[in-house]
Image: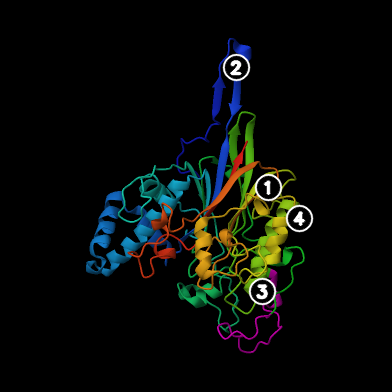
Amino acid sequence: MKLLKTAAALAVSVALLTGCNDDDVKYVDHTEVKIATYNLSFDRNTFADLVAEMALTSAEQTALVSAYIEDREAMEPADKTTAEKVIQIRNVAAIIQKNRPDVLMMGEYNNDGTGEDLTALKDFQTNYLSVAQSLDGAGGEANLEPIEYPFAESYATNTGRLSGFDLNNDGYVATKEDVNSFDYANDAWGFGKYHGQYAFALMSKYEIDTKNTRTFQNFKWKDLEGATIPTITNCEDEKNPIPDGMICGEEWYTAEEWQQMTLSSKNHVDAPILVSTKDGIETIHILMSHPTPPVFDTGKNLVQNAAEVKFWHNYVTNAQDFYDDAGNTGALKEGAHFVIVGDQNLDAATGAGDGLTEVMAELHADPVVNQNVTNGDLYPTSYGAAEYAVKSSPTHPYPNRITAEFQSGGINADHAIPSASLNIVDSGVYWQASYQEGRMLFNDSRIGKWGNGKDVSSDHRMVWVKAKF
């Protein structure tokens, strides 16, 4: 699905060096592709909420923001809430305009559950990305250049997709009447209070090869190499007590549930991007996922998070056979260009966060991925992360690699992991420190309750790599 039917993939840039005759004319390829992942934190209470916010014209947005900055307490509660959401979206758009990725995976971008309704994506482009935003935050001068993405896709998600089982073992099977409740969310294949919450989307300046895109929404967890039914291992957590009638060490799912349980809490998507170069079309497989956080329960989420990350490791190394939602089988072909992107909710550093970090570390250490990015000088970092870690994550072994801020401290949750076949020339995390221009896009005491995180833009940061052909 394309936003603009007349859009074409970006052509390769060439420099023409003239000489005294045709034999002296040479073309130099300067194609660089910047690929980014960004969890936008657009996790609204309903998909309709996000659609309505994206539909606001620039003039309507400005009126709301101006009233909020002037005296937010004088606003009607509904208008005040909408103004805060508009400020968040504008700041996110500003971060995108500042960094200007050519290909952008966007996490927590709600949809209709199936990914077929592109209304919110189209209006995000028209009313926010195509309008100059401010590097100086809410009410600031429009000093950034608009950015256009001719191609966009939204993908089906397991979040809020009811299972028909009692997946949280509370003795109750949720129904459609429980929508927008925790009962509903906890009995869905992936946690979501309605079908479509926490979904993800893709925007690109290059053509997305939709015909050859593969989705793995229905791939069963049991079919991952080495998978076993998760057991209760978090046994003495007052915040996450063992359900009545169950004991420590017991299998979490029934045999029937395990046969049906999907691996992906949202989806795993292999979307090829077609890049024109002087030597022809280069294909880069954008491998997208957003695994469940490895917390909030008695241990099931811990191993599911690791399994969702392992999926891509097996996929790019052809370690096992896979079946996609269209019935096609096989893994990624050897030598194919790829970038694994998304909020993986998992750090590679030992002791960083609550997840099984060794699973991410094994992926980072595999020679199939670009070692200069995962273990070398091009590991994405930021000054903002290092500054944040001083107070909030003082024990993190690599503080400048942190990409997400949590109450329990930050971790390197967001990843853009390129294949070894790609020539990566640059990388980064966009997180401005207090002394850097653009800080108001992350910390602004005028906005919301806390003046940071989702109040201002997101509690995650954009991570990017740049490949050169």
Q: Is residue 278 magenta?
A: no
Q: Nearer the viewer, mark 4 or mark 2?
A: 2
At 68% across and 54% down in the image, what residue appears?
375
Instruction: Locate the C terminus and report the quarter of the image it occupies.
Output: top right
Neighbor class of circle 3 (other Cα within 10 Å; few <14, some 14-19, many 20+) is some
Per the model, the C-alpha gap separating discs 4 and 2 is 48 Å
How far separated are the C-alphas under marks 3 and 1? Answer: 35 Å
Which residue does the numbered mark 2 point to in the structure image?
25
Q: Earlier in the sequence, mark 3 or mark 2?
A: 2
User: How far apart are the two marked residues, 3 and 2, measured between alpha carbons?
Assistant: 66 Å
Question: What residue is disc 3 on?
Answer: 257
Is the magenta region chiefly helix, strand or loop? Answer: loop
Inspect the magenta stretch and tell me whether residue 252 lies in it.
Answer: yes
* Crowd band around label 1 with a 10 angstrom C-alpha radius: few (<14), some (14–19), many (20+): many
Tell me which amino acid carries mark 2.
Val
Disc 4 vs disc 2: Cβ atoms closer than 8 Å?
no
Work out whether residue 246 or residue 71 is closer to the camera in this orientation and state it. 71
Tag nearer the camera, 1 or 2: 2
Sequence-first tag of 4 and 3:
3
> Where is 177 relative to 83, above or below?
below
> Type of residue at label 4?
Asp
Could one spot residue 429 in this view of the protein?
Answer: yes
